[in-house]
Image: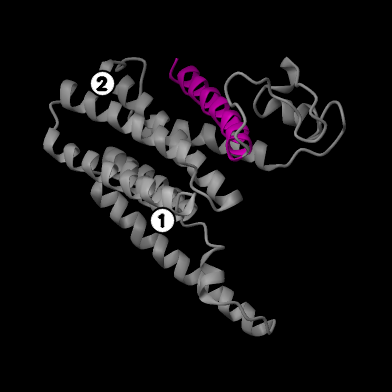
């Protein structure tokens, strides 16, 4: 029975992964991600039911569109598999079992899945476009508030602590609104700050601080390698030009969810 439960969780994770690939592609284009039927991005043909099974459809179709025979990018398959594995890993770290299903653990799993959705969408879009989508951050704020209400009502968490984070959200949103009116666009920095607050809400100050430190180290290493390549290829780019190519949100999000999962596993199975 336990094996069946975890197979089901993997399938759910793969389904989420399939949704992530769709959302990462459509959100920057301001396309609907809920009601519009899935279609091939190359020939725009609507996909049939047999084309929509995560992992299996890719394998059975040989990695090609059934209609135009255009090759499907492997990242779709990879993200679906990784998403399934991530869901199973977190469920395992929470010691999920058919014998311990209760309101608390189910609620934690739901909020974790919602948070994973935020992080993966933020990372995916930032990696592809170097942009923190405001709609994704708004989604992060909404689930953060819902999570805060749950913690305060059900688990009697300290409401003042989360009140500080709400104030931080409001301050950054006000700054972003001022920037939007002045420059007719939201700034990348404001987007990153909103994402960081959401990370703190779900993974805590320690994990988020560690994520920021490691992300900064990773970015520093990236910049060093980039500079060395520039010197070797005799190309000259200013620090500002290089900085505009770094997807800070991607580094932060990927490292945050990795640390969060590892600490969850450590706390449950080693301590």
Residue identifier under label 1 = 189
* Dominant SS in magenta: helix
Viewer-nearest residue: 121 or 176:
176
Please tell me the numbered disc located at residue 1: none
Viewer-nearest residue: 74 or 129:
129
Q: Position of residue 109 (x, y in %)?
A: 36, 26
**Disc 1/disc 2 C-alpha distance (Å):** 35 Å
Compare marks 1 and 2 and give the one earlier in the sequence. 2
Residue at the image point whose x is 57% and y is 25% from the top: 15
- Dot 2: few (<14), some (14–19), or many (≥20) neighbours within 10 Å? few
Q: Secondary structure at mark 2?
A: helix
Quadrant in which residue 266 is drawn: top left
Residue 229 to residue 7: above or below: below
Residue identifier under label 2 = 104
Q: Nearer the viewer, mark 1 or mark 2?
A: 1
Quadrant in which residue 48 is drawn: top right
Residue 249 to residue 42: above or below: below
Q: Position of residue 178 (x, y in %)?
A: 36, 49
Residues shaded magenta:
1-28
11 lies left or right of 75: left
11 is within the stretch colored magenta: yes
91 is within the stretch colored magenta: no
195 lies left or right of 29: left
- Dot 1: few (<14), some (14–19), or many (≥20) neighbours within 10 Å? some
Residue at the image point whose x is 61% and y is 35% from the top: 21
Q: Position of residue 236 (x, y in %)?
A: 63, 81
């Amino acid at each position: 029975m336990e094996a069946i439960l975890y197979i089901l969780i993997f399938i759910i994770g793969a389904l989420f992964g399939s949704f992530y690939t769709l959302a990462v592609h459509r959100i920057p284009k301001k396309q609907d991600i809920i009601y519009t039927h899935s279609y091939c991005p190359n020939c725009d043909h609507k996909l049939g039911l047999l084309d929509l099974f995560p992992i299996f459809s890719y394998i059975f179709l040989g990695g090609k569109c059934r209609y135009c025979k255009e090759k499907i990018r492997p990242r779709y398959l990879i993200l679906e598999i990784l998403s399934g594995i991530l869901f199973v890993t977190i469920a395992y770290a929470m010691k999920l079992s058919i014998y311990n299903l209760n309101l608390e653990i189910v609620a934690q799993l739901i909020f974790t899945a919602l948070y994973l959705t935020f992080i993966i969408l933020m990372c995916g879009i930032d990696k592809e476009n170097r942009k923190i989508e405001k709609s994704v951050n708004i989604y992060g704020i909404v689930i953060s508030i819902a999570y805060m209400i749950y913690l305060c009502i059900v688990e009697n968490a300290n409401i003042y602590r989360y009140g500080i984070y709400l104030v931080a959200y409001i301050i950054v949103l006000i700054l972003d609104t001022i920037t939007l009116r002045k420059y007719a666009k939201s700034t990348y920095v404001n987007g990153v700050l909103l994402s960081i607050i959401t990370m703190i809400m779900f993974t805590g100050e320690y994990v988020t601080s560690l994520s920021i430190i490691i992300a900064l180290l990773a970015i520093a290493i990236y910049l060093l390698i980039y500079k060395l390549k520039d010197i070797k290829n005799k190309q000259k780019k200013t620090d500002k030009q290089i900085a505009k190519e770094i997807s800070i949100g991607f580094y932060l999000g990927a490292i945050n969810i990795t640390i969060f999962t590892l600490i969850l596993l450590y706390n449950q199975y080693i301590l």
